[in-house]
C-alpha cells in the first residue's frame, strides 16, 4: 500500500547571503539537500522544522514565511512505495550561528562513510552566486532553489 511521506525543510541564509545545505551519506549514496526531515504524527509543520533543525544542527530557529509545497507527484528516493509531499519555509537562527560547517562538497571523515549501510551528515554554506538547481540532489529541492533564485526573496 502506498503512503504519503510529509517532509518539512528550511532555507537558512546567513548575513553573507549563503544558504545552509546538508551533505548526506545515506545507504551508500551521496545527497545534497536542505536541512529538515519527516513530520511526526501529532506534529505541526512548523514544530517539525524547529525540531529537525535542533536535532540536525543544534540551532534554535524561528520559522518564517512558507515558500513552497510540492505540487507534483514525487516518489520517495528511499522507499519506492511512498509519495513525498515537501513543505518549505524560510528560517532564521535565534542566536548567532555556531555550527561546524565544511567548505568542500561531501567532505566526510573516512569513518563517516566506512559503513555502506550507514548514514552521516555534514553542513556547508553555498554562496548565492554559486547557488543553482544543480546544487541540490533531490527533485523537489531543485524546484525550490529555482523559485528562490527566480525572485522569491531570501
Image (cartoon, rainbow, N blue to C red):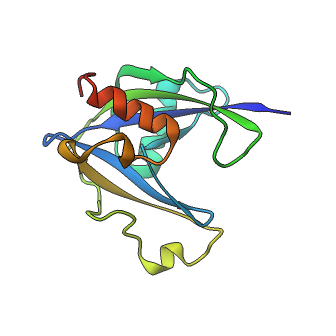
Q: Is residue 144 left or right of residue 71?
A: left
Q: At 29% from the left edge and 63% from the top edge, which residue is drawn?
A: 102
Task: Kindly indicate the quadrant of the structure image that contains residue 50.
Answer: top left
Q: Position of residue 77 (x, y in %)?
A: 63, 46
Q: Looking at this view, name the residue that lies furthest to the right.
A: 1
Does residue 50 appear in the picture of this structure?
no
Q: At 59% from the left edge and 27% from the top edge, which residue is drawn?
A: 43
* Image quadrant where one finds the C terminus: top left
Q: How many marks?
A: 0
Q: Looking at this view, name the residue that lies furthest to the left.
A: 16
Q: At 55% from the left edge and 20% from the top edge, which residue is drawn?
A: 71
Say above or below: 38 vs 77. above
Task: Kindly indicate the quadrant of the structure image that contains residue 99.
Answer: bottom left
Say above or below: 35 vs 4. below
Say above or below: 150 vs 98. above
Q: Is residue 111 left or right of residue 65?
A: right
Q: Is residue 41 left or right of residue 142?
A: right
Q: Position of residue 42 (x, y in %)?
A: 65, 25
Q: Position of residue 36 (x, y in %)?
A: 47, 41
Q: At 24% from the left edge and 53% from the top edge, which residue is drawn?
A: 98
21 or 139: nearer the viewer: 139
* Image quadrant where one finds the N terminus: top right
Say above or below: 78 vs 150. below
Amino acid at each position: 500500500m502506498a503512503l504519503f511521506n510529509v517532509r518539512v525543510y528550511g532555507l537558512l541564509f546567513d548575513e553573507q547571503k549563503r544558504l545552509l545545505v546538508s551533505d548526506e551519506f545515506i545507504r551508500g549514496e551521496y545527497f545534497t539537500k536542505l536541512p529538515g526531515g519527516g513530520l511526526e504524527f501529532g506534529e505541526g509543520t512548523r514544530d517539525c522544522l524547529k525540531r529537525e533543525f535542533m536535532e540536525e544542527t543544534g540551532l534554535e530557529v524561528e520559522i518564517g514565511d512558507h515558500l513552497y509545497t510540492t505540487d507534483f507527484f514525487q516518489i520517495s528516493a528511499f522507499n519506492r512505495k511512498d509519495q513525498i509531499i515537501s513543505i518549505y519555509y524560510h528560517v532564521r537562527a535565534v542566536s548567532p550561528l555556531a555550527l561546524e560547517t565544511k567548505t568542500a562538497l561531501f567532505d566526510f571523515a573516512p569513518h563517516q562513510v566506512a559503513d555502506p549501510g550507514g548514514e552521516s551528515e555534514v553542513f556547508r554554506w553555498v554562496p548565492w552566486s554559486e547557488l543553482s538547481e544543480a546544487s541540490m540532489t533531490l527533485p523537489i529541492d531543485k524546484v525550490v532553489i529555482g523559485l528562490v533564485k527566480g525572485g522569491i526573496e531570501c
